[in-house]
Image (cartoon, rainbow, N blue to C red):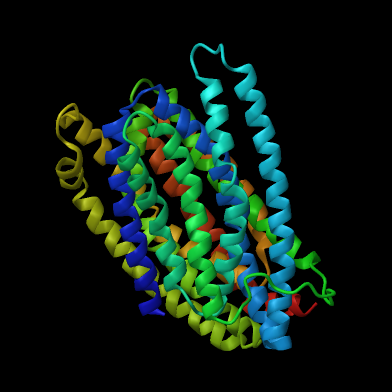
Amino acid sequence: MLFDTFTVSAFTTLAKVFGAAKALVLARFFGSGAVLDAYLLAFLAPSFLADVFCGSLVPVLVPKLIEFEYRDGRTGAIDLYGHVLRRTFLLSCSAAAVLACGAAIMAALGSGSARLNLHLIGILTILMTPILPLAAVTNVWRAVLNAQGRFTIPALTLTLTPSIIILGILLAGRSHGIWILAAGTSLASLAEVLVLGLGLRSVGFPILPPRRERSFSLVEIKKEYVYLSAATAMSAGTAFIGQSMAAGLGAGSVSILNYGTRLVGVLMAIGPAALSVTILPRFSHLAAARDGERLKQMLWRILSGSLIVAGAAAALLIVFSVPIVRLSLQRGAFTATDTRIVASVQGFSLLQLPFILGTTILMRILSALNANRVLLPISGAALVINTGLNYGLMTRHGVAGIALATSLAQAIVFMALAILVFRRGLGGFLRDCDA
């Protein structure tokens, strides 16, 4: 598991490097003008829908694929995969069509807009609507590969989007760059489909599974998906609310918040996100085998070790927060005063690192036990608590108060999940699965 986690983390780190290079290329060709703003606003809707509603397919589908293979063999897993693939693709195509219609209306009616080029935003949104059905396919295929213990190819695809976008912009130049940027974003999603399709064939799963009469119900899978996607949307809403409240603190506050939370975002991607990918199939195998004792031992071992490592890393980074910001950002218009403020935000933000890692592990154990329903009330309460803490702490500590509020909210979520999981016991959730 350590090797698999390291592999996923390594490719995620590489993707972050390519992402940084993409930011440099965008800055060189587009600066910070209205054209780039139009692309970013157009990308917002399809990317949010893909991340929340398509991304939630993986943690829901992996345990079910493993359970069906335990119970009915490879044929049962392929049948489940085929039904889910067809249904999610059709639903995502319908959602993409609705999004494209809305974008077309925006493009038609927004040609005379003064502050925002709504016409350009609408056209670019139409160019990027294929992201949605392609994301549905890629996430179903990621789930199949992860359920089979294959992590390298899904992790490799993380590097495709930034690298293809960089190549497209460099080839196109300034003249048609924004159109190439939008088309390249969709093309990158298509490239992920092609690479994952090759990986799918390598594990013996068909690209287009045969249509068979369904002998099982999808009701439970639908419920788990709704619970998890709603909880994910609420988590995304927390970041949106934080940035919106930061905007009320004055000019530059949103930028300071983004600079101060960037390091945590990178660490989350190469740490908790990578670990969540590799532990879910292992939890799911033990849950499918009804081996509650080994599942509990694995959970304790992974959770305790992860909290110790993440806590030590967070403490070390907090101590050196000022030098980190100074070395990485302090040049040009970014002054020593900015360094001090951003370092304060970064220090408060780093406090959440062990809690995020612990929450990620507990969420994956609940996904493996088909208990995502408990995440919905906890995520809703966390959204309310985080908003209240933002308001209370930002009045005293400014932007740093928002970062501190997020860390405190993450600590509360972790403690709530830990109490729920360990007080009730894994055996209780396993009995619910049987029911």
Is residue 215 shown above or below 345? below
Find residue 280 and report its image quarter: bottom right
Residue positioned 50% across, 53% down in the render: 189
Residue positioned 52% across, 79% down in the render: 202
Residue 198 image position (x, y, % from top left): 51, 71
Q: Is residue 211 left or right of residue 197?
A: right
Is residue 434 shown above or below 250? below
Residue positioned 39% across, 72% down in the render: 5
Q: Nearer the viewer, residue 342 or 195?
A: 195
The number of numbered badges drawn on the structure is: 0
Q: Quadrant of the C terminus?
A: bottom right
Is residue 398 visible to us here?
A: no
Residue 330 image position (x, y, % from top left): 16, 36
Residue positioned 32% across, 44% down in the render: 22
Residue 3 image position (x, y, % from top left): 36, 79
Q: Nearer the viewer, residue 23 or 371?
A: 23
Residue 218 image position (x, y, % from top left): 79, 67
Is residue 134 shown above or below 322? below
Find residue 262 and report its image quarter: top left
